[in-house]
Amino acid sequence: MTLPQYTERVRVSTRGDYACRALLSLALHEEQTPTSVRDIAERTGLPQPYLEQILLSLKGAGLVRSKRGVGGGYVLARTAGAISLAEVVAAVDGPIVAGDFGEPHQDGACDHEGQCVLLAVWADVGNHMKEHLASFTLADMVDQARGTRTVVRTLDHHA
């Protein structure tokens, strides 16, 4: 049996993608001195005003530290190997879920036909996505970007 091709996918938001790209840029350069938002924006091609907002969220989540003034900017708060893509996405997007459908009901408290079964499936999809993103660190992405090893894996599809 061949599975149909779907045009809609579970997505990481643009904000989540930009956050990962910004932190990957910091990890690729491994500078001990802070990197300015302008330099990160130039290296990644991301819009600087939006990047500033994202970096503030990442700072609030404890993933980057900042220094103000001349020579100021951002550095990773932890090693690249200690920061997962799941953490980065969750820091800017909130919990990683397949959709805003709510939690599966407990003890047969299903309000509408079929709702409980599908809520459990959506929760499972979100958990798989979270686990997959958690299996990659920024250090893995640095290795992949530098071509020193292949770490990007695809999910198995069952026919």
Image (cartoon, helix red, strand yellow):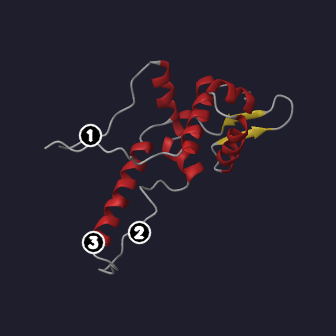
Residue at the extreme left of the image, as rendered: 1
Q: Local crowd at mark 3 within 10 Å, few (<14), some, or many (≥20)?
A: few
Q: Is residue 61 left or right of residue 74?
A: left
Q: Considering the image in quadrants, where does the C terminus appear?
A: top left
- Numbered disc 2: secondary structure: loop
Q: Which residue lies under the disc numbered 2?
A: 103
Depth check, front residue: 153 or 43: 43
Q: Position of residue 117 (x, y in %)?
A: 28, 68
Which amino acid type is shown beneath numbered disc 3?
A: Gly
Q: Local crowd at mark 1 within 10 Å, few (<14), some, or many (≥20)?
A: few
Q: Which residue lies under the disc numbered 3?
A: 114
Depth check, front residue: 142 or 38: 38
Marks 3 and 2 in Cβ contact (< 8 Å)? no
Q: Position of residue 68 (x, y in %)?
A: 83, 38
Q: Is residue 130 in view from this perspective?
A: yes
Label 3 or label 2, whichever comes before in sequence order: 2
Depth check, front residue: 114 or 155: 114
Q: CA distance from mark 1 to mark 2?
A: 26 Å
Q: Quadrant of residue 22?
A: top right
Residue at the extreme right of the image, as rendered: 70
Who's the residue at 76% across and 33% down the image? 73
Label 3 or label 1, whichever comes before in sequence order: 3
Instruction: Indicate which label's residue lies in the foreground, 3 or 1.
Output: 3
The mark found on residue 156 in the picture is 1
- Numbered disc 3: secondary structure: loop
Q: Quadrant of residue 50?
A: top right
Q: Is residue 36 in view from this perspective?
A: no
Q: Position of residue 119 (x, y in %)?
A: 35, 66
Marks 3 and 1 in Cβ contact (< 8 Å)? no
Q: Is residue 102 above or below residue 15?
A: below
Q: CA distance from mark 3 to mark 2?
A: 14 Å
